[in-house]
Image (cartoon, helix red, strand yellow):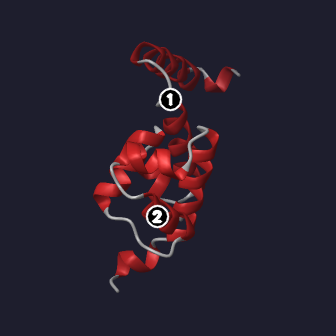
Amino acid sequence: MNFYEDKIDYSKIGQKIKQKRQELGMSQEELAEACDISYSYIGHIERASRNLSLNTAIKLSQVLNVSLDYLLLDAIPTESALINSINSELCNHSPEQVQKFLNTVKILAENIERL
């Protein structure tokens, strides 16, 4: 096992996949079909009894509408986790809405001392 494999918590990845799948009202079978993989493999991933490949992680992130960072990175500093959380939330909005959000953040950052 190499350095990075030691850092990956597959049970947390599986929990995130299961939670997001359930939030979307999808069954394991529906998720598997959308990702073109077997539903038993989804069960193994969610239980962390099998590791997922990068291709599978990409497919899952696209179908579940989450970033790869959200799925794969959990042992990161709090600030990065906040940024990842914001990024995951912004994935659900149009490019125009994201740009408005960024403009608002810039204005707030420029005026933070006055708040």
Q: Is residue 49 above or below residue 111?
A: below
Dot 1 alpha-carbon crowd within 10 angstroms: few under 14, some 14 to 19, many 20 or more: some
Q: Quadrant of the C terminus?
A: top right
The residue that appears at 45% across and 59% down in the rendered structure is 72
Q: Is residue 18 above or below residue 114?
A: below
Which label lies toward us, 2 or 1? 2
**Image position, residue 16 (x, y; %):** 57, 55
**Image position, residue 41 (x, y; %):** 43, 64
Q: Residue furthest left?
A: 55
The residue that appears at 44% across and 74% down in the rendered structure is 50
**Image position, residue 101 (x, y; %):** 52, 20
The residue that appears at 48% across and 65% down in the rendered structure is 45
Q: Amino acid under label 2?
A: Ser
Identify the residue under disc 2: 40
Circle on res. 90: 1
Q: Quadrant of the N terminus?
A: bottom left
Q: Is residue 75 above or below residue 110?
A: below
Q: Is residue 115 above or below residue 91?
A: above
Is residue 36 toward the left or the right of residue 67 in the image? Answer: left
Q: Residue furthest bottom?
A: 1
